[in-house]
Structure formats: structure tokens, C-alpha cells
């Protein structure tokens, strides 16, 4: 297909999977135009700031040659905290301003009932609608986008400070052979080892969970384009064939803008359209699919259900999610939800609510990297995709990637360590002509979805015929400095 270019409670299961942060994210609107007031970085930190703009892989390769004093690192840590707080507070102020204006405008509407014309009432409705959009966007930025952005910068600062010593330790483990005795270090036996016994016991669980999700109306529509569907299935099956998966893999492509993939027990893998759009090459996709297959292999869904006490919060989460989604209003966690209407569901495991260790994500990372490597793919694809999500598009569209996941630094260093421990191959697949064909076919799928969604109802858009709204303060693909400017530094193109 390709030419290388270089007695389970099923309601409980769905409740577990649907422990999500229910946050509608609108695309546009501003209480006051413009971004946060700029903050100026001390000149002595300018060079170090520029280094933080580079990719993780660039830093892995180059930071061992750098030597920054500990006091300079500490100064940058202080500045990052100051910049984060300044940025968050700016948007919290905007939220308070929007709340005040909403209260005043709604009070005006009540007082003027029976006294105003239909045209005046329409204008007030549009104003309220716009304020709601703006407030929600700013809430997402303050609560999620800004913290994620600065957590990412702090992780890169940690890398600059600590990686030179870490890499020496890794080199020593490789030299003395001790790395072979790490957890799941027997990579030459992939497919013949047992990561977690009883995978086959999860098949019925997964089947019934999928069926219940469909019957509940909380499953987004599927992509039907054969070029897209066949390609995704081929890559997933290729990675699965080079993994420790001992049950059949069932792959579904969902027509959702969410940049995410999720797996259910028993070998059920769901890939969302937004993930395919965000990937720049096949190796990135292989890394993500390997990660999700790792969850199935290690039976994390089974373990989540064993540990979870089915408290009211789980049922409540499932009920609210089902209510929102079956109402045909919108998806969850997607930046474009209110711009284009209903885009489906991003399923995000909230491990903090479940009281489950973040170790599950680290395990899936390690297994996923091994499976991509064993399939012949460039194993750094996983790091590149994560970096892109954390640095650019991931602020909002890919919120599922960062909810209660391990600290960025730990995750990236563990991933790079595993890659360094893997036996080197003379040639890795990065992308294929089939990948490019899939991307071309996907454009038509996306265009049709956007056209179909134009007239669908949305949570904050019941009033039709309002004047064109202002552009959003934040757009996917932009660095956080676009909405919270930093003065005193030159823009550096990430590498």
C-alpha cells in the first residue's frame, strides 16, 4: 500500500471514559479588542528565552553543549512564573469584565421588555451572545491554554538545565549494558511477551461499551471516505502486528475536530479527524496509535474500572455529556465547536478524578514508542507530535493530551531515554505517498463537514443575523505570545 519515503458494569465503563472537562469553546469575540498588556523580559534573559522557543528534539541534541549558570536558570524560572501570572490575570480580568457587561445587558433586556422594538431586541440578543462567546473563550485561555503553554516552557527550561547530566547517565547505562534490564527492555521479544495477561477478557467489555455509546448518541459520526479509512486502518494494523496486542484491533475514524485518539478495552481504537489533520507525517501517526495500542496491551481500561469506585460524579459526568451531545449542540473540548456546530466528542480520561496513577500514560508512551520502532517508523515521531501539540495547536484543540497527564519534562525525557535505548536501525520510515494521499482526501471530508455544520445549532449561537464578530484573540497554531506579548526578545522560528 505504501512506498516508504524515508459481570462488568458497562455504564460504569462509559462513565469512566467520559470523566471529562465539559467546556464549550467558542471561536470569537472580545470584551475589549487586543491581547494582554505586554510584559518585558530582562535583557540578560533574552538569549535563554530564545532557546525555549526550540523544539524538544533540538534541545535534546544541542543543550549538552550549552552551559547556563544556575542563577540564570532561576531568574528565568521566576520570569516564567511572572509572565504566566500576568497573562492569566489579564484574561481573568477580561472574564470579570464580560460578567459585568452580561449582567448589565441582561438586566437591560428585562427592564425594556415591552418597550423596545424587535430590531432593538435583536441587537441586545446579539450583544449577549457575543459576550457569552468572549467569556467562554477567555475562560479556556485562562484555565487551560496559558497554563499549558508555560508548563511547556518550564519543561524546556528543565531540559536545558538537567538534560546534559541525564544524557551522561543514559550513555553510562548503554555502555555497561544495564539499560537492558529496564521495564520492558526485552524489545527483541515484542509479540511474544506478556505485558498484562487477560487481554481477551476485555473484548466483551469493549464491545458492549461501544454499543452503549452508540445507543446513547454520544459517538460522533464516522468518516466514510475509503481513502482515509483504509489508510488509517492499515497503519494501525501495521503497528498492532508489531506490538504485544493479542486480540483483533478494530479501528474507527470519527468525524470530529478534536485532536485526539482513544482506545477502549479489548482492542477498540478510535482516531478523530482532527488528529489526522494535525499530523505532519506518518511516523507521528504511528507513534500516537502505538500509544493507544499500549493502553489496550497494558489493560489500563480494565485497571481503571477495578480501581474506580462508581461514585455519583462518574454517572453525572456521563449524563451531562450525553445530554449535551444528544442535544445536537456541540462537542466537548474543541476550539471550533461553536464556530462550526456539532463536531463530536473528545474522550478524555481524567486520571485525577479517578485517583489513578499517571504512570499509565508513561507506560503507554514507552510501549507506543517501542511499537512504532518495531514497525520500522522513526520513533521520534511521538516526541515531535507531542511537541507540536504543546507548543502550538495543542493549547485548545488537543486539550485531551494534557489533562492530568505526567509532567511534560518527565514525559519527554522518558520518551527520549527509551528511544536512545532501542537498537538503532539503518533506515526509518518518516512518511509515505499513502499519507499524502490520505491528507488530500481528508481535505474534502473536512470541507464537507464544515459545510454541513454551518446551520447546526450551537450553545451560544441561537440568534441568527448578528453582525460579523471580531476574530478570536487566539487561533490554533499561534504561540501563546500572540495573546500575551513578550517585549525585549526577537521571534525565533521553532526548530
Image (tube, rainbow, N blue to C red):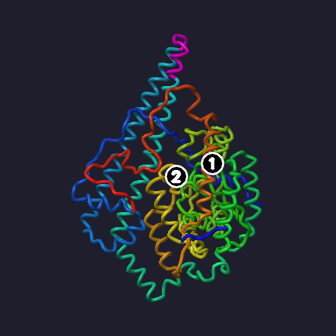
User: Is residue 274 depicted above or below 408 in this figure?
Assistant: above
Q: What element carries label 1?
A: helix
Residue 292, numbered label:
none
Report the residue that reaches farthest toward the left. Answer: 43
Whether residue 457 is in magenta: the answer is no
| Residue 169 percent location from the top left of the image | 40, 80
| Residue 462 percent location from the top left of the image | 59, 29
How dense is the environment of label 2, judged by Cα within 10 Å: few (below 14), some, or many (20 and up)? many
Which mark is nearer the camera, 1 or 2? 1
Residue drawn 58% across the image and 80% down it: 187
| Residue 228 percent location from the top left of the image | 66, 56
| Residue 33 percent location from the top left of the image | 38, 34
Can you identify the residue that label 2 sits on?
A: 399
Whether residue 122 is in magenta: the answer is yes
Residue drawn 49% across the image and 61% down it: 386
Q: Which of marks 1 and 2 is nearer the N terminus?
A: 2
Quadrant of image for the C terminus: bottom left
Residue 349 visible in image = no
User: Is residue 326 depicted above or below 145 in this figure?
Assistant: above
Quadrant of image for the N terminus: bottom right
The residue segment tinted magenta is 113-124
**Image side of residue 382 versus residue 248, left or right:** left
Q: Compute the Cα span from label 1 to label 2.
A: 25 Å
How dense is the environment of label 1, judged by Cα within 10 Å: few (below 14), some, or many (20 and up)? few
Amino acid at each position: 500500500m505504501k512506498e516508504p519515503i524515508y459481570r462488568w458494569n458497562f455504564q460504569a465503563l462509559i462513565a469512566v471514559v467520559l470523566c471529562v472537562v465539559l467546556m464549550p469553546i467558542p471561536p470569537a469575540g472580545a470584551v475589549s479588542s487586543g491581547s494582554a498588556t505586554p510584559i518585558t523580559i530582562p535583557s540578560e534573559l533574552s538569549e535563554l528565552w530564545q532557546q525555549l522557543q526550540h523544539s524538544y528534539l533540538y534541545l535534546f541534541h544541542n543543550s549538552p553543549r550549552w552551559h547556563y549558570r544556575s542563577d540564570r536558570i532561576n531568574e528565568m524560572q521566576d520570569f516564567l512564573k511572572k509572565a504566566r501570572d500576568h497573562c492569566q490575570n489579564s484574561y481573568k480580568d477580561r472574564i470579570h469584565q464580560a460578567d459585568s457587561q452580561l449582567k448589565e445587558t441582561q438586566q437591560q433586556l428585562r427592564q425594556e421588555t415591552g418597550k423596545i422594538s424587535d430590531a432593538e431586541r435583536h441587537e441586545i440578543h446579539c450583544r449577549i451572545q457575543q459576550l457569552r462567546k468572549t467569556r467562554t473563550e477567555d475562560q479556556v485561555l485562562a484555565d487551560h491554554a496559558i497554563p499549558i503553554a508555560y508548563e511547556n516552557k518550564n519543561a524546556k527550561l528543565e531540559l536545558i538545565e538537567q538534560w546534559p547530566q541525564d544524557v551522561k547517565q543514559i550513555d553510562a547505562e548503554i555502555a555497561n549494558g544495564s539499560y537492558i534490564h529496564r521495564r520492558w527492555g526485552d524489545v527483541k521479544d515484542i509479540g511474544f511477551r506478556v505485558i498484562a495477561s487477560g487481554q481477551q477478557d476485555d473484548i466483551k467489555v469493549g464491545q458492549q461499551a461501544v454499543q452503549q455509546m452508540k445507543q446513547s448518541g454520544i459517538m460522533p459520526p464516522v468518516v466514510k471516505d475509503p481513502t482515509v479509512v483504509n489508510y488509517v486502518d492499515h497503519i494501525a494494523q501495521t503497528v498492532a502486528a508489531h506490538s504485544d496486542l493479542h486480540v483483533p484491533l478494530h479501528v474507527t475514524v470519527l468525524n470530529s475536530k478534536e485532536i485526539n485518539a482513544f482506545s477502549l478495552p479489548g482492542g477498540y481504537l478510535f482516531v478523530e479527524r482532527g488528529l489526522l489533520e494535525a499530523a505532519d507525517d506518518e511516523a507521528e501517526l504511528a507513534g500516537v496509535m502505538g500509544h493507544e495500542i499500549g493502553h489496550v496491551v497494558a489493560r489500563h481500561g480494565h485497571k481503571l474500572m477495578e480501581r474506580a469506585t462508581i461514585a455519583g460524579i462518574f454517572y453525572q459526568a456521563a449524563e451531562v455529556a450525553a445530554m449535551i451531545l444528544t442535544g445536537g449542540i456541540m462537542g466537548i473540548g474543541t476550539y471550533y465547536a461553536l464556530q462550526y456546530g456539532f463536531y463530536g466528542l473528545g474522550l478524555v480520561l481524567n486520571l485525577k478524578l479517578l485517583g489513578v496513577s499517571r504512570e499509565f500514560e508513561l507506560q503507554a508512551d514507552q510501549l507506543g514508542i517501542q511499537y512504532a520502532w518495531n514497525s520500522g517508523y522513526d520513533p521520534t515521531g511521538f516526541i515531535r507530535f507531542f511537541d507540536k501539540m504543546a507548543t502550538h495547536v495543542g493549547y485548545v484543540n488537543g486539550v485531551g493530551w494534557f489533562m492530568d497527564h505526567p509532567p511534560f519534562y518527565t514525559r519527554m525525557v522518558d520518551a527520549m531515554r527509551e528511544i536512545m535505548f532501542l537498537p538503532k536501525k539503518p533506515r526509518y520510515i518518516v512518511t509515505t505517498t499513502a499519507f499524502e494521499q490520505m491528507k488530500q482526501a481528508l481535505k474534502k471530508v473536512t470541507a464537507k463537514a464544515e459545510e454541513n455544520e454551518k446551520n447546526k445549532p450551537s450553545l451560544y449561537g441561537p440568534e441568527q443575523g448578528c453582525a460579523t464578530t471580531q476574530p478570536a484573540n487566539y487561533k490554533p497554531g499561534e504561540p501563546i505570545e500572540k495573546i500575551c506579548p513578550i517585549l525585549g526578545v526577537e521571534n525565533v522560528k521553532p526548530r
